[in-house]
Amino acid sequence: MLEKKAKQPFCFFTSSVLVEIIGKRAHHLKEFVQLLKKIDANSIFYHVHHAFREYHFAPGEYSNDFARWIEEDLEESRLAERIAAINIRDFIDLGTLRAGLVKIIEEHLANAVEIRKVSPGREFYFLRNSTIVMPTKYKVNTLSEFMKTLNKVGMRSLYYHFFDARLRLGHHCNDFSNWIERDLGFKELAAKIEALDPYFITMDELKTHIINLCKEDAKKRRLGLGKTLQIIRKVLSKN
Amino acid sequence: MAGFKLADYAKIIRPQDMEEIILLAEKLAGTTVKMVNSTSVGGGVAEMLHRVIPLFNELGLKVKWEVIKGTGDFFNVTKAFHNALHGKEEKVTNELLNTYIEVNRQNAKEMSFEEDIVEIHDPQPAALIEEKKKSPGKWVWRCHIDTSRPYLPVWKFLEQYINQYDASIFSAPSFAKELPIPQYMIYPAIDPLAEKNRELSKTEINSVLEKFKIKTDKPIITQVSRFDYLKDPIGVFETYKLVKKHIDCQFIYAGGTADDDPEGVEVLSQLQDRASGEKDFHILLLPPFSDLEVNALQRASTIVMQKSLREGFGLTVTEALWKGRPVIAGAVGGIPLQVIHNFTGVLVHSIEGAAYQIRYLLNNPDEAKKIGQYGKAHVREKFLLTRYLRNYLLLFIILKNQNKSLITF
């Protein structure tokens, strides 16, 4: 199973980003939510996701920029907790993620007694990414090659195929699962990889989990094939 | 300055990260770039250009660096610009503004701008943008100054030039403005191979400690700063007094000599008075070029402090974080970009807060170790020269692709 040739090879890409400063900033929560409603969707993606790219060495330590600002600078712990707990995987696109964030903040504002203004220099600055996507030298045709190569590719490549692909590029599923199902026909393995929760593990751990799932799947298939052959042999011997 | 090669940095970052830098550079093979600033020696900008330009050229780009020539009056006005961008009210007469424009025009006559990309650093040569109409390339203005609260008349004068560029670069989000041109963020960076940051052997560290007669029999808390009120040296001493009530420790305040700075001499003398008789509060006067000493003191410390009351980006914090020491720092200027509270370091707002956090970390060494490790990882990810190099390669690609936000090869 590990050596089954895919209909199309999988090409590993990598993405690099340069941060762009939009020039918009919020001094308090009301201003923040007004800006959040109209800000470029790329900016929302940046603020909820860049921590996974930049703080991959400490998963779960830093949730997202919005929650951090609300906690550290506005000192609104309850709201910060709710924003930090937002499960990005529940949202199929950035529009619905934006609506989800706005809803939580507006609920909070509806009951807020006081609108707190941050001290000068601690405003929320909206940023966004400029992204450059490039193919790497790695191209694989089988699951065995995929597993070996996954160990070699950089963290940005893994980020691109696992995080960028789903929400920002609208693929609705990570690229690895897409390829494994579409070009190798291993639907169950694809679903298991898609079900991984990458938000509380390091990128290296994510790689290991994916590789282990591939190994387990191959073993299961080998066992399954072995049983089928046994049955065929039995039937043939009876005849 | 030692000439380091890419291969030297490959030992510090992940191999895949170096592969990606090379991959990006391949897209820019042969691209010509001109950097222009106002000095070839002294200051962080010149130092960074000295370090980064050979690496660009090793990667296959053709990067040149030119320095504009100025008169005394010109540098007086650009010094006033510098102060005004930092928020100081400066009276700049029309005559001085004309000097600024004239000196830029005079320099332009002696320069050519045939390159694919022209990068102008800081306000001094910003008016060279008048040459853009004769140039085939993209022009970018790199601002190294904290312009978060500029003196507006000076900012307005400079803005008319800045708006003519194809893009601008700032060091932090709060330094930027609402401009009609794209503004990119590139953090400053430290060179991990520089004398101030390179790995040191135990022997090297011990020899520095011996030189300053510092024993390692009790925890060391260090602040490396100029003798400047804005670095709060008296606050550091007060913090020492509060901590010392509970824990037997020693503090080091290490700063540069202050012969040419009357205020520095006054601050030093005040600190010496306050700390007189305190054998565990060491005040170290470091001569210029004490990079090895700073490196060793930071590495020998249990905790590094930066209790600034005002700060630019705060590269001294970056240097301390890189040593893997837990850093406790004032939440000012660019420090919160580097020290994420209770994650990559600890942010404080008062003397009492600083003392409390020091006591906490001294009593919780595992927590202190974890914070130190995360601080170092944070620097590796965001504040090293190699990241600076990658950001510039990205910028050049973006400029060559009409500032598109998604570029696919």
Image (cartoon, coloured by chain):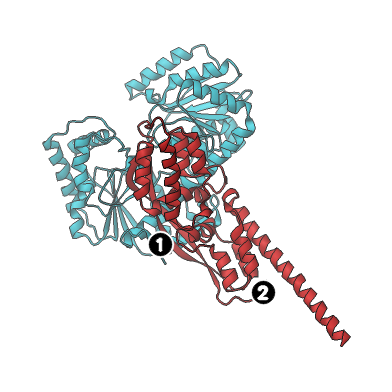
Which residue is denoted by mark 1 in the rendering? B60
Q: What residue appears at the point 45 percent right and 49 percent down from the top-left corner?
A: A100
Q: Label the red chain with its letter.
A: A
Instruction: Between label 1 and label 2, give the one nearer the viewer.
Output: 2
Secondary structure state at the residue bearing disc 1: loop
Residue farthest toward the right in the current orientation of the protein? A238
B246 left or right of B71 in image:
right
Q: CA distance from mark 1 to mark 2?
A: 39 Å
Q: Which quadrant would residue B218 be assigned to in this image?
A: top right
Residue farthest toward the left in the current orientation of the protein? B95
Which residue is denoted by mark 2 in the rendering? A3
**Between A232 and B331, the one nearer to me in the picture:** A232
A183 left or right of A100 in image:
right
Residue farthest toward the front in the current orientation of the protein? A110
Residue farthest toward the bottom in the current orientation of the protein? A239
Q: Chain of mark 2?
A: A
Where does the image place residue A227, in percent across and percent down from the top left?
A: 80, 74
**Between A128 and B182, the one nearer to me in the picture:** A128
Where does the image place residue A221, in percent across and percent down from the top left?
A: 72, 70
How many marks can you see?
2
